[in-house]
Image: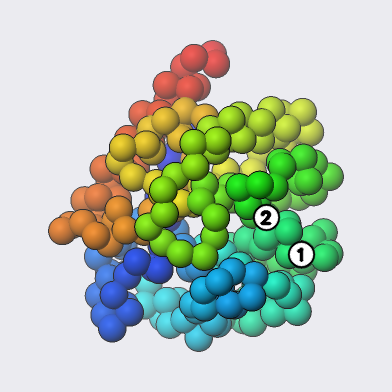
Amino acid sequence: MGTLARIAPSILSADFAHLARDLDRISNADFIHVDVMDGHFTGNLTFGPGMVAACKRSTDVPLDVHMMVSNPDETIGWYVEAGADMITVHAEASTHLHRTVTYLKEHGVKAGAVLNPATPVGVLEDILPELDMVLVMSVNPGFGGQRFIEGTYAKLDRLQALCRAVGAHPLIEVDGGISAANIEDVARHGADVFVAGSAVFGSSDPAAEVQRLRSLAQSGIDTAEADAA
């Protein structure tokens, strides 16, 4: 079987007054994406470990916690204890990325690293074989509903080449501006996990939109794998 497309709806676009209801509406998702922002690393302030714990109580879908914080090495344990299944930290913010990744793995949590739009993929070369996921930001982090940055396609190509060069096989996630209009193209360039916020929660039928996005992404992945064969 080839690579499978995975959809990770971002609860940043959910109705927080009806969070359990909205999580139930996307119970067919592959991950729940939780954007943690501290008001320092980004200009926005969102969720703490309490939100992660609340999601854990409300869904069986694995929690993909994206930490947009200035001090991940100091605070990451909070999110491990809250029940995160996958935690990604920004390469730009983590002083000791290898230590952080090792800590997560020792505590049974999958570990990933995040790259901002202006951060080159090469900064991950030495840690790439240790990562379960690389998250490529296709917008500047901080707010939902932004326009997809077209240069992300070339960046995904470079990341794929680097993975091949070092023999690494992380999931490749893309976050920002993902919709039915571009998800197939993003998948063709090597992504296999897709964060979608407003595209899912803004739909009249979020579960159907998750499935539609997954099908479109799978088509892109299958096309890329057929072309490479």
Circle 1: is it few (<14), some (14-19), or many (20+) Cα within 10 Å?
A: some
The amino acid type, in three-letter code, at marker 2 is Ala
> Which of label 2 and label 1 is nearer to you?
1
Residue 104 visible in the displayed image? yes
Residue at 84% x, 45% y is 126
Give the CA separation, mark 2 to mark 1.
9 Å
Q: Which label's residue is closer to the chain start, 2 or 1?
A: 1
Q: Which mark is residue 152?
A: none
Which of the two residues, 194 or 54, is positioned nearer the viewer here? 194
Q: Position of residue 44 (x, y in %)?
A: 52, 74
Circle 2: is it few (<14), some (14-19), or many (20+) Cα within 10 Å?
A: many
Residue 221 in which image quadrant: top left
Determine whether, in the image, residue 56 is placed left or right of residue 93: left
Residue at 73% x, 75% y is 71
Q: Quickly name the residue at label 2.
A: 113
The amino acid type, in three-letter code, at marker 1 is Ser
